[in-house]
Image (cartoon, rainbow, N blue to C red):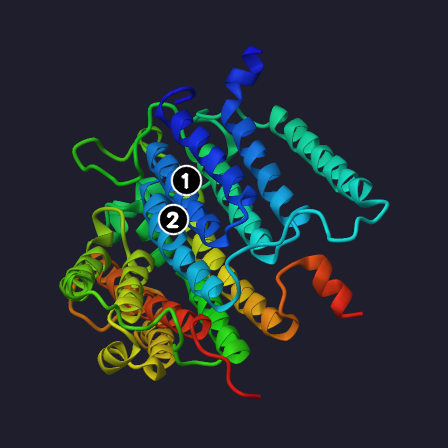
Amino acid sequence: MSILIERLPYVCVVLLIVVGLYGIVIERNLFKKVIGLGIFQAACILFFIVISVKSGSSVPIIDPSLGVRPELYANPIPHGLMLTAIVVSVALTGVALSLIISIYRRFQSLDEEVILEKSQ
Amino acid sequence: MLLGVEFVFFVLALLAAVLALQLKDLLISAIILAVFSFLSALLYISMGAVDVGFNEAVLGAGITGIFFIAAIYQTQRHALRRWPEKKKTFTWLSYLIPLFLLLGFGGILMVGVWTIALPGDPLAPASTYLSPDYIRRAYSETHTPNVVTAMIADFRSFDTLGEVLVVFTAALACFFILGGRAGGKLVRASDSPIIEMVVSLMVPVIQIFALYVIFHGHYGPGGGFQGGALLAASIILQRIFLGKERSERNFPSRIALPLGVLGIVFYVLLGVLGIFGGKAFLDYAGLPFLMDTPSLHSMGILLLEISVALVVFGALVSIFDSLASEEHAA
């Protein structure tokens, strides 16, 4: 049980990943799938943020009065990576929503099963 | 850090995520997703990732939310009932197998996180390989206290070039799928004069704040991505509440994508100026200004953030215009 408390941030990340994957795989509505994708992306970003925290550290903005000792500041490299990830996630969501609108105009439905039947 | 305010944010975010997937009303689902994004942003900020949290709040909660709303206005607001009309024999079994696979995947991830370094460990491999070097060098080489900005705009600026190209390509893809000019129910002018007046006052304030965020990215959380997205949000706000005629006069749809191209051209030009100065591509020491090297790096970072903001601005407004555009008679 104490191991669970120690690694609680990671367990939280895994929970969110599973919720996101549930949305993508099991939900039938197309919009819900894209919502699940957004949740999955937020969970992956959370994982990188969790591994960049150091105990006792602060935000990665150098305070000249404190100096540049690395253990004072959170790890900035995953932060930079996640900035890119968020912007790419927005772009991806935009394209996914365009495709959903296009599919709706063609099949008049947002439900995966109905669209699969109509396209046979 | 384990059971403090971060845990409260996480529990609320998890509840919002589950709720967004369960609701039948898609518009409310989209709004709950925006709430989830905002709670995630608060979670990131409380863990020290202020730049990432700012980005998630603007782009995840704001821009993605309005993209969803625009798409739902174009399709339908309510999802079907969960079970199909005619019950097939194997329906519940077809849900059981994916659920089993999902739990199996979750189990594998749990085994994975059991063996990596503990959260908060300053000697974890992620925190000892390159980041102490970046933290030590950032201020002395670039005069930029925000290490994340120094990293994405100077040490790793080539990756940022790839990223703005990705955003622009997505805007092009949306344009080719759906067309360009916003029209239809979402961008009708509001009937209420109160809304019109308040929005007309808000838009310039948002834009000035966006410019502040771009220029202040050196010293605090902020930078080109957040500022560009805020500028796009101000234009989208205009489109929705002041109507498409008035908003088209202020910012026509046809200049959004060319503005993105202009940003990319500035970016590459900045890199090529480094070559003309006798150094490498995107090496700010070759810029033709008369300053000492750390100030040259600082100026280069600022010019790069401005071009990134232009690209993100043009691309996001263009994606919104495509999502809100009316169907052409084929």
Upstream in sequence: badge 1 or badge 2: 1
Q: Is residue B153 left or right of residue B191?
A: right
Q: Which mark is residue B281?
A: none
Residue B128 visible here:
no
Using the numbered discs, state the Cα–Cα distance from disc 1 to disc 2 in whole angstroms. 8 Å
Q: Which mark is residue B56?
A: 2
Tell me which amino acid carries mark 1.
Answer: Ser
Helix, strand or loop for disc 1 = helix
Residue B60 is situated, as x and y percent measured from the top left of the image, at 41, 51
Picture quadrant of residue B289: bottom left
Helix, strand or loop for disc 2 = helix
| Parent chain of label 2 | B
Residue A38 visible here:
yes
Residue at the bottom extreme of this rendering:
B330
Q: Quadrant of the C terminus of chain A?
A: bottom right
- Does residue B292 lie above or below B175 as drawn? above
Q: Which residue is tagged 1? A: B40
- Does residue B225 lie above or below A101 as drawn? above
B121 or B114, nearer to the observer: B114
Residue A90 is situated, as x and y percent measured from the top left of the image, at 45, 58
Residue B115 is situated, as x and y percent measured from the top left of the image, at 62, 25
Residue A108 is situated, as x and y percent measured from the top left of the image, at 62, 69
| Parent chain of label 1 | B
Tell me which amino acid carries mark 2.
Answer: Glu
Task: Report the residue at 36% width, 66% height from top.
Answer: B312
Task: Report the residue at 37% width, 43% height from top.
Answer: B38
Task: Categorize mark 1 by other alpha carbons within 10 Å: few (<14), some (14-19), many (20+).
Answer: many
